[in-house]
Amino acid sequence: MSAPRYRPPRESAWQRVWQPFWVLPVVLTVASGVLAVALPALDRSLSASVPWLFQGGPDGARSLLSTIASAMISVTGLVFSITMVVLQLASSQFTPRVLGSFLDSRVTQSTLGVFTGTFVYALTVLRSVRGESDELQAFVPQTSVTAAFLFVLASVGFFLAFIQHITNSIRVSQVVLGTADEARDVVGRLYPQEPPDEPADDGPPRPAARTVTVGDRSGHLREVDLDGLLRIAAEHDVLIEVVRQMGEFLPEGGRVAVVRAGSHAALTDELVEDVGKAVVLARERGVGQDPAFGLRKLVDIAERALSPAVNDPTTASQVVDAEHRALRLAVQRYDPPARLVDDEGRLRVVHRPQTVADLLQLAVREIAHWGRDSLQIPVRLRAMLDDLDEVALPRHRPALAAVRREIPPDHPEESPRDR
């Protein structure tokens, strides 16, 4: 019986296109510019004035559009300034690793896009307004000017939504719970509910081996195309071992995989190059295939809260509660399979998934160390582990016992109220 198909979700090309912070604002701005060119053409086709559209003359239209343009560029600067202040506060108060969540916010991106789009729209339509002269007849694009007013109303709505979003984003509970939700979602996607089947044997001997490096690239291991590696291994009848764990940093020339075959003749340069292409490096870690990254951010927040300069054990306790949600799901799941087979049941890929024990060590060890002198933290950690032990699969209980030993002994002063 072959192992179940374990395929961590990969980031699609469409997701990569929309990932940068500037893409959505640019798209909205360009769309506004195109609309500003198209609507005046529609206005020229109207044979008579429409009562519910803008009824002013050329001077009134120019004044309105100029006011809208100047106001929008001023408010755009304000929104950008607020965003920078929030990013600075988040970086200093929580951890720099949460900045990605702020920059990925569609509310912030849409607000900047609507404001810059309204600015470009007003300036472009302003070019279409024409006063009366001896050679030309006066022209006021009624529909276009009315649409500019509607753009302003939309901008006001987006600005209010932006303020609401920003005020919620810098709340400790919002950041902690949002990060925990992110980690829990990844655990739910990657860790199977049923025990994975292991291959019956390792297959034929493969004495020949060749190392795969990242070449001149460097960064954190963010994604591995396991489907691609399985296909490559089956086509060339080789075994591919991924020797790095997700999230690890690789310098230039760092070893990322080993390809094993029955003979050296099968280990061609083309094969090694194809294996290297299945590995994605990035400057920063991502949560797609890296369940530990969400917990890493939570631990960083707790460590900063427990530092002598901050001394905020309550925030660290909130982090422990947030970790509890993700870990409670993890201990009820099985570790991802480390040995993957092809359609015929032959072992083709061996990799290093993050195990439940790895997540427990990450979530508990550092917080227990830095919170050893706190009255709250040891109590919360023990309460969390007690609950996890009740619902955990038997195979995870040794790992729970191991991390429990990391927690300092009870304080004599501590009481249930500290919980």
Image (spheres, rainbow, N blue to C red):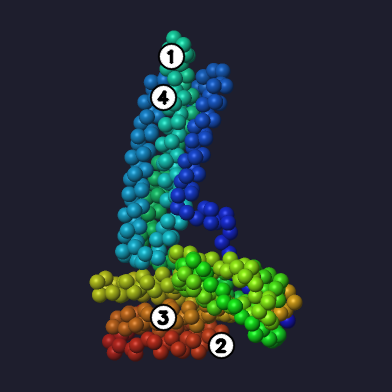
Q: Residues within 10 Å of mark 3 (few under 14, many from 20)?
A: many
In the shown orientation, is residue 13 left or right of residue 261?
left
Choose mark 2 or mark 3, whichever is in front. Answer: 3
Choose mark 1 or mark 4, whichever is in front. Answer: 1
Q: Secondary structure at mark 4?
A: helix
* Residue ID at (47%, 69%): 252
> What residue is disc 4 on?
61
Q: Amino acid at mark 3?
A: Val
* Residue ID at (34%, 66%): 94
Q: Quadrant of residue 199?
A: bottom right
What is the residue that sits farthest to the front in this orientation?
A: 265
Q: Secondary structure at mark 1?
A: loop
Q: Position of residue 179 (x, y in %)?
A: 44, 66
CA separation in Å, label 2 and label 4: 74 Å
Which is more N-terminal, label 1 or label 2? 1
Q: Amino acid at mark 1?
A: Glu
Q: Position of residue 212 (x, y in %)?
A: 56, 74
Choose mark 2 or mark 4, whichever is in front. Answer: 4
> What residue is disc 3 on?
364
